[in-house]
Image (cartoon, helix red, strand yellow):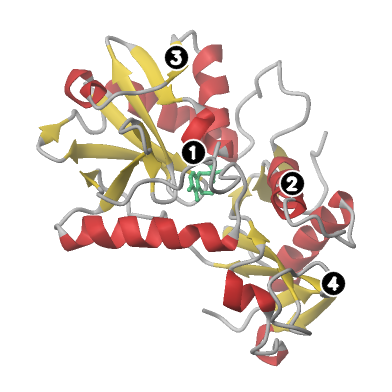
């Protein structure tokens, strides 16, 4: 990673000079919230995709600890823009993290100091550009009654790591996690879609992180007149589907070549069409769905923002 400038608790500082104590509560217990956001080069300079939605989810995620976050949503959005500018990035991945301080290792962090860091870095498409092979992991998605799994909390990612390692150890590229009822949940860090008889289908939000990319794809699909269904997905959908893809901020739209021994057309026609539209959307080249209450693209230099 380049020696970038990061934003830490209100100031831009060289990453090399930033440090936190080894007693940091979040390091021990996973008690933090984070986001993964992308900024893309556009004809109007760098632009962050769905900035407002990501920062909203970040603050909502952190709210599950019941501790007051000292910055406003607007302040964090501005801090993200300032960090991108300070590093002169065009295309980059942005990682904001909210974490608790190291004043005590007692279980509840409620009395601890609250910190926020924003890191920016180069990142290629996660999982690469080729269609991937998925294996069904024996590691189940965290039960929604055990954790508020709609939030993006640091500690939850041990579940993703174990599932990913399980799939990799069996020679697959990525894990498909099932929920405790045995129905399809999601990938380790991405949501999943299937195409069955020309209909685009994705699991309901019960056991997944409801991704911002997932919502982008559902809006684009509706606008294109593609029939969409959001429902509980039994394993049999894998046999019926002709196409499948993963989606997430880091992985964008990643066609799935196979799940276990079932092969799909990869990329299939609908996956390709959605990929083309998604690529236009992230670069601000596409008229945004009329139903959206806020613009998807925030230009870093301010030009062209609605
Ligand atoms: N599920 C999980 C578990 C994730 O970590 C991610 C990445 N944030 C996603 C789905 C996709 O979410 P998004 O489209 O908001 O990046």
Q: Which residue is mark 1?
A: 208
Question: N-terminal of the two: label 4 or label 1?
Answer: 4
Q: Earlier in the sequence, mark 2 or mark 1?
A: 2
**Which residue is rendered at x = 76% and y = 78% of the image?**
101
Badge 3 is on which residue?
Answer: 229
Q: Are marks 1 and 3 in contact (CB under 8 Å)?
A: no
Give the image quarter of residue 163.
Answer: bottom left
Between label 4 and label 1, give the one nearer the viewer: 4
**Quarter of the image where one finds residue 287:** top right
Cα distance, mark 2 to mark 1? 16 Å
Instruction: Identify the residue position indicated by label 2 in the image.
Output: 60
Mark-to-mark CA distance, 2 and 4: 19 Å
- Position of 297 relative to 226 (above/below): below
Q: Please identify, in this view, whether the residue under mark 3 or under mark 4 is nearer the observer.
A: 4
Q: CA distance from mark 3 to mark 2?
A: 26 Å
Give the number of the mark in front: 3 or 2: 2
């Amino acid at each position: 990673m380049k020696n970038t400038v990061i934003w830490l608790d209100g100031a831009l500082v060289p990453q090399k000079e930033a440090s936190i104590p080894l007693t940091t509560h979040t390091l021990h217990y996973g008690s933090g919230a984070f986001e993964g956001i992308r900024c893309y080069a556009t004809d109007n300079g760098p632009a962050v995709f769905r900035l407002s939605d990501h920062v909203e989810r970040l603050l909502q995620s952190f709210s599950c600890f019941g501790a007051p976050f000292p910055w406003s949503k607007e302040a964090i959005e501005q801090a993200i823009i300032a960090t991108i500018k300070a590093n002169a990035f065009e295309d980059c991945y942005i990682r904001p993290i909210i974490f608790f301080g190291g004043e005590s290792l007692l279980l509840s962090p409620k009395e601890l100091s609250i910190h926020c860091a924003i890191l920016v870095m180069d990142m290629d498409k996660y999982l690469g550009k080729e269609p991937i092979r998925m294996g069904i992991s024996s590691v189940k998605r965290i039960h929604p009654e055990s954790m508020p799994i709609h939030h993006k909390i640091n500690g939850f990612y041990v579940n993703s790591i174990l599932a990913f390692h399980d799939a990799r150890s069996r020679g697959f590229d990525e894990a498909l996690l099932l929920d405790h009822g045995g129905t399809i949940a999601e990938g380790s860090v991405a949501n999943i879609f299937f195409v069955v008889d020309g209909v685009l289908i994705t699991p309901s939000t019960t056991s997944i992180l409801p991704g911002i990319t997932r919502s982008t794809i559902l809006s684009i699909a509706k606008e294109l007149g593609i029939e969409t269904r959001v429902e509980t997905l039994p394993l049999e959908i894998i046999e019926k589907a002709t196409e499948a893809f993963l989606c997430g901020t880091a992985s964008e739209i990643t066609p799935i070549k196979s799940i276990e021994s079932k092969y799909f057309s990869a990329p299939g026609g609908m996956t390709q069409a959605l990929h083309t539209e998604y690529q236009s959307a992230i670069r601000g080249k596409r008229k945004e769905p009329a139903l959206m209450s806020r613009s998807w693209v925030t230009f870093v230099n301010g030009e062209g923002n609605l």
